[in-house]
Image (tube, rainbow, N blue to C red):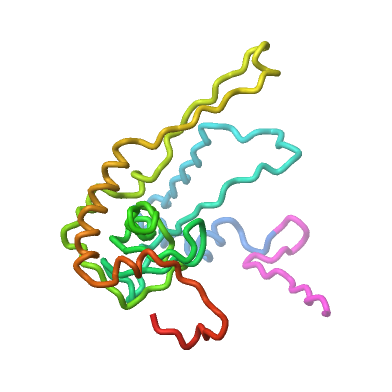
């Protein structure tokens, strides 16, 4: 790209010789219209106040910076949305668990917890499944329903299933090489009573329907010749 041509500066008072202008000081005063500016402001040239200086920061920036970059945590503005419950799962629906310790067991759905997990039970006396939380991704909803109108599930939430945090004991010099005897933790009596109260109401509703207790006690499994895509639950 070609450089721009240099344009000579134009002035109202050209030099006759170096340092001597064509017009005098008084002539330039009228030529520049300074008299009109002065008359407009009451015989005084207008003054512009200087801009206030920027305030100095309270803390001076450091002169030296660390050699390694310190990672700053990113701001996470994501707000979790409540988990949408599947349309086929309603309170009292019999579900089939597909994974975990009770895989293949049939359970009764009681309610959805604030975390989005499902509160289910066997009942425990029927098939050995206690009150527990299950992710709805690992269950199949069936068309079988159980009347749970008399079951009180207001006391069950996510904190109910939380584990108590215990502080670890420090080992002494003599106990370091000795094997510690692990004490078996007893199941809380309050949770046993809660399970019994829920089971008592559910079993009455289950026994009122013929063959429902046997259906819940049996385990679901696929046998040879069964086509999963043709099954109706």
Of the 4 image quadrants, the one containing the C terminus is bottom left
Of the 4 image quadrants, the one containing the N terminus is bottom right
Task: Residue at 67%, 18% (x, y): give it.
Answer: 178
The answer to if 93 sits in the magenta stretch is: no
Range drawn in magenta: 1-20
Q: Residue furthest top?
A: 174
Q: Quadrant of residue 194?
A: top left
Can residue 21 be seen here? The reply is yes
| Front position in the image: 80 or 17 | 80
Task: Residue at 36%, 73% (x, y): give it.
Answer: 86
| Front position in the image: 71 or 56 | 71
Going by the image, does 117 lie left or right of 100? left
Q: Main secondary structure of the magenta part?
A: loop
- Is 127 drawn above or below residue 6 in the view shown? above
Q: Quadrant of residue 141?
A: bottom left
x, y percentage for residue 75? 51, 52
């Amino acid at each position: 790209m070609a450089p721009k041509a240099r344009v000579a500066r134009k002035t109202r008072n050209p030099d006759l010789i170096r340092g001597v202008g064509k017009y005098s000081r008084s002539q330039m005063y009228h030529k520049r219209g300074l008299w009109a500016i002065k008359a407009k402001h009451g015989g005084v040239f207008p003054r512009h106040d200087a801009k206030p200086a920027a305030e100095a920061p309270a803390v001076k920036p450091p002169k030296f910076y660390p050699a390694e970059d310190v990672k700053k945590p990113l701001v996470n503005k994501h707000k979790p949305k409540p988990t949408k419950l599947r349309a086929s799962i309603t309170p009292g629906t019999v579900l089939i668990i597909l994974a975990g310790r009770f895989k293949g067991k049939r359970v009764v759905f009681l309610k959805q917890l604030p975390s989005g997990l499902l509160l289910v039970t066997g009942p425990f006396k029927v098939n050995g499944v206690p009150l527990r939380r299950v992710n709805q991704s690992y269950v199949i909803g069936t068309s079988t329903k159980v009347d749970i109108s008399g079951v009180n599930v207001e006391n069950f939430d996510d904190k109910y299933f939380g584990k108590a945090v215990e502080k670890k004991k420090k080992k002494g010099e003599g106990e370091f090489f000795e094997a510690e005897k692990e004490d078996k933790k007893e199941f809380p009596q309050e949770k046993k009573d809660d399970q019994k109260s829920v089971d008592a109401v559910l079993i009455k509703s289950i026994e009122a329907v013929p063959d429902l207790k046997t259906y819940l006690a049996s385990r679901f499994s696929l046998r040879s010749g069964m086509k999963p895509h043709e099954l109706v639950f």
